[in-house]
Image (tube, rainbow, N blue to C red):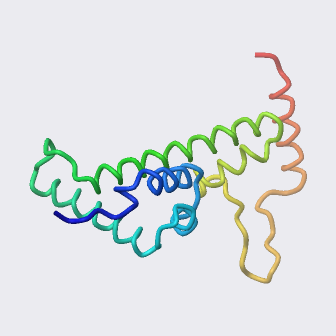
Amino acid sequence: MERLPKLIRDPWHRRRYLLAVGACASQRLAAAYARVDRRTLQRTLARARREGDAREQRGDQDAELSPHEVWLAEVERAEAEGEVRLLAQIQLAGEATWQAFAWVLERRRAPDYSLRRSWSRRRSRPSVSREELVAAMASARSAASRPT
């Protein structure tokens, strides 16, 4: 029987890696925190994905997951929980400052909300006049202040 990597077989290494991943650490940092060689981590992740792909291609969805696949599912769950936890913190911060909400929108819907920068050296002219912009802002303010 093949010996499993310590990321899978050893509870201490496994817990430390999942804790770091759950805190949104990079793979490099999580491996270092778990005291696992980064190449071992990469091989373990690759093998887990290969085994999952092979089982899927065989149509063996009901088959028992390999230890590598179980570990990968734990890693993906820890990553997702960490990201949701961070997004919740950003939501809380957004209650005090609008920049937190803007940050999320810039990343979730970049085409709609990200800052567009012109890479040319020439100064670009706005497509609307200053007067039109001031009028639009005044209209938006008055609409926002009206009770619904």
Residue at x 56% of width, y 41% of height = 84
What x and y, as percent, mark residue 96? Answer: 83, 36
Horizontal side of residue 75 vs 65, given as left or right: right
Residue visible at 28% across and 53% down in the picture: 69
Indicate the position of residue 145 as horizontal and vertical percent values: 85, 25
What quarter of the picture does the N terminus occupy? bottom left
Choose between 120 and 47: the one closer to the eye. 47
Q: Position of residue 134 (x, y in %)?
A: 89, 47
Quarter assignment of residue 138: top right
Q: Quadrant of the C terminus?
A: top right
Q: Position of residue 97 (x, y in %)?
A: 82, 41
Tell which of 97 and 19 is nearer to you: 19
Left or right: where 130 falls relative to 21: right
Is 68 or 126 nearer to us in this picture? 68
Q: Residue at x 42, y 52 (%)?
A: 75
Along the horizontal axis of the image, is 24 left or right of 1? right
Residue situated in front as seen by the camera: 3 or 73: 3
